[in-house]
């Protein structure tokens, strides 16, 4: 196992009705900015519950944070926070709203152009406003980590940053708030959480059996519960288990002390920035091809994955690996997420453009062994057509 630091200060308030506890975790004298997305929280009762919980407190609102939150839009919120001297952010929504809150929190007191935060991947952040989250969409894990992804539309650049200053102080997870989500968002969320586990697990053995078994436990739970979430949307236990899976998939626990990949996410980010695919759609496309092309480097873990997650224990090694990747891809399709570039209108003619963006973002040595060059990414994309 590698040396590691593990530090996760985010308090989780999990369960039905927990928004009522908001006043216990937001400081009493805070000047709050409530951040939200496209308006679903106005219709499903979440915003009403937030208002009730914050009765008598000082708060303002900024809505319209889009999926794949844009630098251009988030800077409007930064200006509002500065102008009104607000001092606490409350993100109410999915990963995009929480990621947006992290950027706003870091940008408010940043000296110079806050785009530099993205260019330096967050290494230049020295402070951030405190913030909390109310999660309405299980997927990204942003509710319990310090990472964020922001898109600058004018540059078609989707960039990630992280900072120890950017953990939420708390996140409230009420599974009943996911009952009314569209099936597309549930499917996307399960695929995103699955891919997060795979990015940290599907590398090479590192004498870390507990991390492996945590990871396999999350994968098996997503495989068991994911289809039920589509079939019976108001099953509390199913939604609760998926919500907690998505949080545990990216809160640092399974990735501590082990090599990590993330090549699938980096290629996927370029597809979203260029062609506007949903984040999870890009992962469903890229991950199976990434595993096929990099089968030799990942052979030992692929065999472990085949045995422990898909119960493939007999027969030829290569056949077991191929079958495990097939089953992974079929699971994504079962969750309603298509797995080929062609399903989204992206063709061979577009591959050069994707590779050009990867190069301009210095994504030329990806993966746990830094051996995913542009030539490898090209093979992956060509296999995904
Ligand atoms: Zn993701």
Image (cartoon, rainbow, N blue to C red):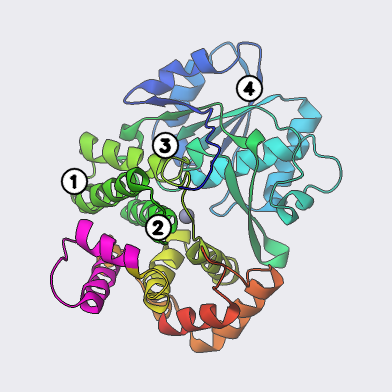
Cβ–Cβ under 8 Å for marks 3 and 2: no
Cβ–Cβ under 8 Å for marks 3 and 4: no
- The quadrant holding residue 383 is bottom left
Cβ–Cβ under 8 Å for marks 4 and 2: no
Residue 182: where, in percent of width, then height? 34, 51
| The disc label shown at residue 195, or none | 2
> What whole-number distance in Å separates the C-alpha atoms at marks 1 and 2?
23 Å
> What whole-number distance in Å separates the C-alpha atoms at marks 1 and 4?
36 Å
Query: Quick check: 273 above or below 354?
Result: above
> What whole-number distance in Å separates the C-alpha atoms at marks 3 and 4?
20 Å
| The disc label shown at residue 232, or none | 1
Q: Secondary structure at mark 4?
A: strand
- Determine crowd level at label 2: few under 14, some 14-19, many 20+ residues with C-alpha closer than 10 A: many
Q: Nearer the viewer, mark 1 or mark 2?
A: 2
Callout 2: CB less than 8 Å from ligand 1? yes
Q: Which residues are magenta?
A: 300-329
Question: Of marks 1 and 2, which one's residue comes earlier in the chain?
Answer: 2
């Amino acid at each position: 196992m590698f040396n590691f630091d593990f530090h996760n200060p985010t308090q989780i308030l999990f369960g039905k009705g927990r928004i009522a506890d908001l006043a216990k975790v937001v400081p009493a004298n805070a000047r709050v900015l409530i951040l939200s997305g496209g308006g679903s929280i106005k219709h499903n009762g979440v915003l009403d519950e937030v208002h009730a919980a914050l009765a008598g407190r000082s708060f303002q609102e900024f809505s319209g944070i889009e999926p794949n939150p844009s630098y251009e839009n988030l800077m409007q919120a930064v200006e509002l926070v500065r102008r009104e001297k607000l001092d606490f952010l409350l993100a109410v929504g999915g990963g995009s709203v929480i990621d947006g809150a992290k950027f706003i929190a870091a940008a408010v007191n940043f000296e110079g152009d806050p785009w530099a935060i993205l260019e330096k991947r967050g290494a230049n952040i020295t402070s951030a406003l405190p913030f909390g989250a109310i999660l309405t969409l299980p997927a990204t894990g942003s509710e319990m980590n310090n990472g964020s992804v922001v898109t600058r539309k004018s540059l078609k650049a989707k960039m990630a940053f992280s900072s120890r200053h950017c953990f939420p102080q708390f996140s409230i997870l009420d599974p009943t708030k996911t009952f009314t989500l569209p099936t597309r968002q549930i499917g996307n969320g399960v695929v995103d959480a699955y891919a997060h586990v795979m990015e940290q697990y599907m590398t090479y053995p590192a004498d870390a059996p507990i991390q492996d078994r945590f990871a396999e436990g999350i994968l098996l739970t997503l495989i068991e519960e994911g289809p039920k979430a589509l079939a019976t949307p108001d099953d509390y236990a199913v939604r609760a288990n998926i919500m907690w899976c998505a949080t545990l998939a990216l809160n640092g626990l399974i990735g501590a002390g082990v090599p990590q990949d993330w090549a699938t996410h980096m290629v996927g980010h370029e597809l979203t920035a260029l062609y506007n695919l949903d984040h999870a759609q890009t992962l469903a496309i890229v991950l199976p091809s990434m595993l096929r092309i990099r089968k030799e480097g990942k052979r030992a873990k692929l065999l472990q994955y085949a045995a422990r997650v898909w119960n493939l224990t007999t027969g030829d090694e290569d056949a077991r690996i191929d079958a495990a990747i097939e089953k992974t891809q079929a699971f994504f399709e079962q969750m309603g997420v298509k797995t080929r570039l062609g399903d989204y209108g992206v063709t061979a003619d577009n591959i050069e453009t994707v590779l050009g963006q990867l190069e301009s973002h210095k994504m030329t040595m990806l993966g746990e062994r830094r051996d995913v060059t542009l030539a490898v990414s090209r093979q992956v994309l060509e296999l995904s057509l």
